Amino acid sequence: MKSSVHPIIKRYVPFVKGIAGTFGSNCEVVLHDFSDLNHSIVAIENGHVTGRDSNSSMTDHSLQQVKAGNTQKDTINYSGKGADGRTIKSTTMFIRDDNDKVVGCLCINFDATEFAIAKKALAELLDFGEDATPKDESSKKINDVLKEVVQTKIDEIGKPVAYLNKDEKVKIVNQLDGQGVFLIKGAIDYVADILCVSRYTIYNYLDETREDK
C-alpha cells in the first residue's frame, strides 16, 4: 500500500480482501485513491481478471467518469470486455469525505465469461423446440388464467417450488380451493404437476384444509 493514502480510503482496505475472498478468484476488487489518478490503486485482489496490479492505473471507464466529474452516482452492474475478450461485469462505488467530496472509489470487476458460456449451454439444453408437446394431455386443457392464479400463489410464498415444505404447499392448495380453482377440469393434475406431488397428495391436502373449515 502507498505510504500517503487518504485516511478515509484506508478504512476500506479490509473490504478488498473480504469481498474477493467471498466471491472467489473470478472477482477482482480494487480500491482507488484519487489524489494521484495515474497511480491510484491502493489495494487490489485477483488482478488477473483485468491484468492489473498495484502499479497499474484505473480502467478507462472509471478514469473518464472521474475526469468528467460524473461521480454523483455509483455505477452498478455495467458490462465490459477484458483485454482478452472476456465478459466482465463491473460496479464502481465512489467514496466521499465528510464534506461530500469524492476521494476515491471501490471497484468490483467480475469475470462472468464462464457463466455466460454455461447460460448458453443451458439455453440450448432446455430448448424443446416448437413442435414439442407435453405428455400430460390434461395440461393442454388448462387455460392461461388458471396458470396465472397458481403462479401468483407460489410467488406470494416467495420460494422456488423445489424449496417449498408441506405446510407451504398445503397453504397454496387451500387458497386455490377457496378461489374455486379445483372446479376447473384438469386443475388437480395441473397443480399436482406444478407442486411436484401426486394428484392423491393434492386430495389429501384438500381433505386436511376442508376439515378445518
Image: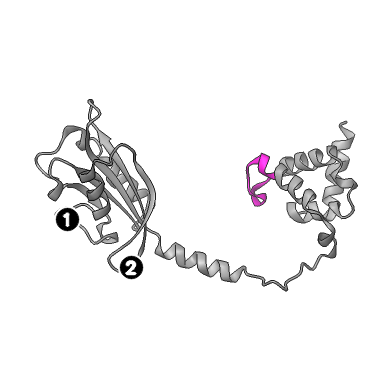
Q: Classify the position of the N terminus by image quarter.
A: top left
The secondary structure type at the circle numbered 1 is: loop
Query: The magenta stretch spans which residues?
Result: 154-164
Q: Would you name the residue on which mark 1 appears?
A: 56
Residue in front for this viewpoint, 195 or 92: 92
Q: Position of residue 31 (x, y in %)?
A: 24, 45
Q: Position of residue 106 (x, y in %)?
A: 28, 43
Q: Classify the position of the C terminus by image quarter.
A: top right
Q: Is residue 137 above or below residue 14?
A: below
Image depth: mark 1 or mark 2 in front: 2
Q: Is residue 207 left or right of residue 44?
A: right
Q: Mark number for residue 85? A: 2
Q: Position of residue 140 (x, y in %)?
A: 82, 62
Q: Amino acid at mark 1?
A: Ser
Q: Which numbered disc flags the more N-terminal residue, 1 or 2?
A: 1
Residue 80, by quadrant, is bottom left
* Residue depicted at 26% across the width and 46% down the height: 65
Task: Determine crowd level at label 1: few under 14, some 14-19, many 20+ residues with C-alpha closer than 10 A.
Answer: few
* Residue depicted at 90% across the width and 46% down the height: 183
